[in-house]
Image: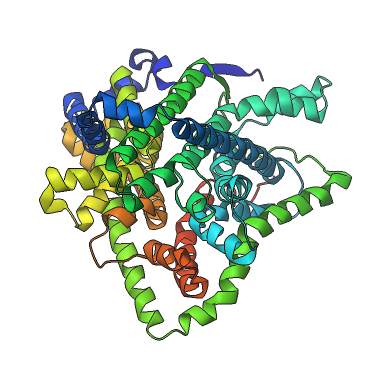
């Protein structure tokens, strides 16, 4: 079997050449999908537009005075350096762990598939809280890099492991049959197969590090997000916060542009058809035990330290008078806000996901990139922008759960769009074409055929948005209704004053709730399937 390369972008395969797309494009009126998608992106971009308007009101002289300072340059260097260090470490850990789990005879592979993904359920501020409460005087750049790496490498592990799980093993077998050793096959064939997944995961990590607030604040690492929050919340310097936010937006735009440029020029190996079969497992031999020790070490640092720290303080925190009532109230608020955010996000994501899958082209690509730009903004910028927007434009929404839900929709829209588009793209087009041939209108086909086929993707997107909404801290701190606390905000409040025992119940419950959708995501990736050795 020969390997073929195809462009990574959807626009490379036009509707007229696919043989599948023409029927799919008639699923619903394209103008209606395009209009709904444009409206969804416009809603998601409200904070970004308002941020630009309010910054421009400060005037060019004030903006220049805030912008051209050594502090801004130092913050930019530190933020980019932190993103680079964490991204490189996450790629190393994520690719290595995924290869060990999917391609070798490592003992307990299915267990490690779960353990390697579970740090996704641990918010960075909980991990930072656990490390600070365990190790005295832990602060600065490198502790922040360590904590962010341990929390972020699943963003690389999950897509790369899924890519390796679904890749055609014949290409690697052909390489070895031609006399190439295991290492050369890995570098020349395997890495090229997983290159798009690795690049996507690395981009998510870099954007996540640039937007992180919890870990860098607790560990006192000076980055843009911490400086923005301090300028607004403590220094009451709104103009300075706005200018810093715009600089951070510019950095994220550069990252997105670089990723888009790489994706267009990149290539990936495509499986030419046939049923997927499990690959031949590489025997590690004497390297089995060092590899096992390495994965156990990563799991101990990423999961063991938070677990031990929370367990040590959990009993004392729950035994406080009124603690259980406060924890349950905060949990109820977290669930309510996250569910509202997930509902609004999925409502906005559905037309854009269908447009991306059914009518790919320049307009769909542009809308997808704009939605991704909003996702790249940190929660502190979104919260700051929506505060100004709520006070001056949409005051009835100010201090309500729906303004917070709008923040969640802005931050997490691309996660939901990707899930919907992936499921819609895998739906058999023949069923829709048959329904149309029987006289059903496009909206009837959408309601009775496409949406039921897309429900798995809708469910996965809702679970992912719910998970990230439960963990979101800075936007929740800024936008929650007065007198209302969540698990994340109560944890932050107690950690800020060193009340680690009081913070433990909130942290433990937040991790426990977040672990459920994380496990579902692992199960959907196919990594827990038993191999058929017939």
**In-front residue for pair 503/417:** 503
Asked whether, in this view, residue 374 is left or right of residue 447, the answer is right
Number of marks drawn = 0
Q: Position of residue 384 (x, y in %)?
A: 29, 45
Give percent across and percent down for residue 294.
75, 50
- The reply, left or right, for residue 305 in relation to residue 404 is right
Seen at 35% across and 76% down, the residue is 326
Picture residue at 33% right of the left edge, 42% below the top: 381
**Outermost residue toward the top?**
17
**Residue at the farthest right position:** 286
Residue 368 visible, this orientation: no
Whole-percent x, y for residue 356 in the image = 33, 28
Figure quadrant of the C terminus: top right
Q: Looking at the image, can residue 31 be seen?
A: yes
Residue 334: which quarter of the image? bottom left
Front in this rendered view, residue 229 or 269? 229
Instruction: Name the residue at 39% across, 42% down.
Output: 378
> What percent of the width, then of the height, locates residue 143?
62, 50
Q: Quadrant of residue 36?
A: top left
Q: Residue at x 68, y 53 (%)?
A: 298
Vertical arrangement, residue 308 with respect to residue 23, above or below: below
């Amino acid at each position: 079997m020969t390997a073929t390369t195809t462009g990574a972008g959807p626009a490379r395969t036009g509707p007229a050449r696919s043989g599948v797309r023409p029927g799919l494009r008639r699923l619903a009126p394209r103008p209606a999908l395009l209009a709904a998608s444009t409206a969804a992106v416009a809603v998601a971009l409200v904070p970004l537009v308002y941020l630009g308007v309010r910054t421009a009101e400060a005037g060019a002289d004030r903006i220049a005075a805030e912008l051209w300072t050594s502090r801004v340059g130092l913050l930019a260097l530190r933020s980019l350096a932190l993103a680079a260090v964490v991204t490189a470490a996450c790629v190393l850990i994520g690719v290595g762990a995924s290869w060990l789990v999917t391609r070798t005879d490592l003992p307990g592979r299915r267990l490690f598939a779960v353990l390697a993904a579970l740090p996704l359920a641990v918010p960075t501020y909980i991990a930072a809280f656990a490390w600070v409460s365990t190790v005295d005087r832990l602060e600065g750049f490198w502790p922040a890099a360590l904590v962010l790496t341990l929390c972020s490498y699943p963003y690389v592990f999950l897509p790369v492991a899924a890519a390796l799980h679904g890749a055609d093993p014949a290409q690697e077998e052909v390489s070895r049959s031609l006399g190439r050793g295991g290492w050369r096959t890995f570098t020349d064939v395997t890495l090229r197969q997983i290159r798009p997944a690795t690049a996507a995961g690395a981009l998510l990590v870099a954007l996540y590090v640039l937007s992180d607030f919890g870990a860098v604040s607790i560990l006192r690492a000076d980055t843009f997000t911490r400086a923005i929050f301090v300028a607004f919340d403590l220094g009451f310097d709104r103009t300075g916060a706005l200018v810093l936010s715009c600089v951070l937006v510019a950095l994220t735009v550069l990252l997105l542009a670089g990723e888009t440029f790489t994706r267009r020029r990149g290539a990936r190996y495509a499986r030419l058809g046939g049923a997927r079969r499990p690959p031949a497992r590489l025997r590690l031999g004497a390297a089995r035990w060092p590899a096992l020790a390495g994965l156990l070490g990563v799991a101990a640092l990423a999961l063991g330290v938070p677990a031990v720290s929370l367990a040590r303080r959990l009993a004392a925190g729950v035994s406080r008078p009124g603690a259980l009532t406060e924890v349950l109230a905060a949990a109820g608020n977290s669930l309510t806000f996250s569910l509202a955010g997930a509902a609004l996000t999925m409502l906005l994501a559905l037309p854009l996901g269908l447009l991306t899958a059914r009518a790919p082209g320049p307009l769909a690509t542009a809308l997808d990139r704009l939605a991704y730009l909003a996702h790249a903004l940190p929660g502190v910028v979104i919260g700051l922008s929506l505060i100004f927007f709520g006070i001056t434009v949409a005051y009835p929404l100010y201090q309500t759960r729906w303004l917070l839900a709008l923040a969640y929709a802005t931050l997490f829209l691309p996660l939901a769009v990707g899930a919907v588009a992936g499921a819609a793209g895998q739906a058999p087009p023949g069923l829709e074409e048959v329904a149309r041939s029987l006289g059903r209108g496009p909206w009837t086909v959408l309601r009775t055929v496409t949406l039921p086929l897309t429900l798995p993707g809708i469910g996965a997107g809702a679970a992912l948005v719910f998970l990230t909404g439960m963990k979101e801290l800075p936007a929740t701190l800024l936008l929650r209704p007065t007198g209302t606390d969540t698990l994340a905000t109560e944890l932050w409040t107690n950690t800020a004053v060193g009340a680690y025992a009081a913070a433990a119940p909130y942290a433990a419950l937040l991790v426990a709730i977040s672990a459920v959708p994380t496990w579902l995501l692992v199960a959907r990736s196919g990594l827990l399937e038993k191999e058929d050795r017939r």
